[in-house]
Each structure stands twice: as structure tokens, then as C-alpha cells.
Amino acid sequence: MPERSTERSKTATTIMDIAEDYIRTRGYNAFSFRDISAEIGIKTASIHYHFPSKADLGVAVTQRYTDRFIESLGEPDAYPVMEQVRRYKEAFRSSYAAGEQMCLCGMLGAEIASLPDNVMMKSKAFFDQNMSWLTRVFLSDKASAYSEESAQSEALKLLALLEGGLIVARTMDGLKTFDQIIDYNL
């Protein structure tokens, strides 16, 4: 029976790392357990031991990605608003710069109609948590006196700018294009 504790084995972590890379560069539907097994050099049955289905793997990878991303942001009121916005933009930029990797949940969002429900829900949770964090950032700006509604609107604009910016950058001139996009001030 697979380990069910929060601590994952080295093999399970490696499987998740490879799956994350595939999702962020190809998409969820563009890889199989066979691709992972060929890359690691283990049988697909070994992958099934840790993740009985691809959906189980997708859920684990998405949850880990979300947890790491949200944790990296810190508290919404830890810095002045414009510094938080800069840091948020940089989280997307540095990921793309380090290997032209898309946001994992942005890639999942593009495939939402064909995802298993549990993977879809984890992807949606990423966006919900980002919207909540960004809204709190904008609400912390006492000088601008954002209402809840206007803070949510600013949060949505920024999130859409960055997720869309990754797609446009990938299609056009890469990081140069992304830098032009994120230079846009909301």
C-alpha cells in the first residue's frame, strides 16, 4: 500500500517533480506514466504504487505547487503594496526565466474541460488562494482606500495579466515579451 503520510519517498518526490515539469511545459494531457517511467527508469507499476491514478498524481502535484507558491508570497501586508505587486510579478517572471515554465495551474486551466474533477478543483483552489492573497494586498493599501470589490478587481486584472502574459511570451519573444507585459502598470 502506498505511503499516505505527508512525507513522501524520494521516488514519489521524483515522480512529482517530473510530472510538474511535464505539466508546466507540455500540459496535463500530454504525458503518461510511461513517459515518467522512461525518464526515471522504473516500471509504471512503481508509479502506480505511489499514485494509483494519474489524477492522484495531478492532485498531489497541484497541491504541492499551490502550497509552495502561496508560502513564497508571505503575508499580504508584509511589504508596501507596490513592493508586493513587484514581488508577485517576479514570482511568475523568475519561473519563466528559469526554463520557460508556465504556471502549473495556468496550464491546467487551459485544459480544464478535460481534467479529472479532483485535479480541476485543486487548480481552482490555486486561483482562489491567489485572488484572496492579492485582494488582501490591495486592501492593505490605506492610501488608495480600495473597497472589497475594487481590490478584487485589481487582483483579477493582475492575475490575468500574468497568466496571459506567460502564454503570449511563450508564443512570441519569450522573456523579452514577458518583461514588456509585466511593465504595464495597473
Image: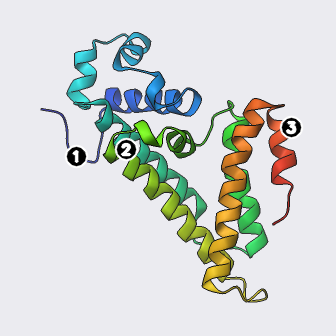
Q: Residue furthest front?
A: 113
Residue type at numbered disc 3? Lys
Reading the chain from its start, which is encountered first: label 2 or label 3? 2
Q: Quadrant of residue 153?
A: bottom right
Q: What number is the disc on residue 119?
A: 2
User: In the picture, which quadrant includes the N terminus?
Assistant: top left
Residue 70 placed where, x, y %?
A: 52, 59
- Asked whether residue 77 is in view, the answer is no
Residue 40 placed where, x, y %?
A: 40, 15
**Residue at 70% of width from left, 73% of height from top?**
79
**Residue at 86% of width from left, 54% of height from top?**
183
Circle 2/circle 3 CB separation < 8 Å:
no
- Asked whether residue 30 is in view, the answer is yes
Locate residue 169 relative to residue 101 in the image: left or right: right
Locate residue 63 relative to residue 6 in the image: left or right: right
Residue on which the image places disc 1? 5
Q: What number is the disc on residue 176?
A: 3
Residue 16 placed where, x, y %?
A: 40, 32
The CA span between labels 3 and 1 is: 42 Å
Q: Residues within 10 Å of mark 2 (few under 14, many from 20)?
A: many
Q: Quadrant of residue 131?
A: bottom right
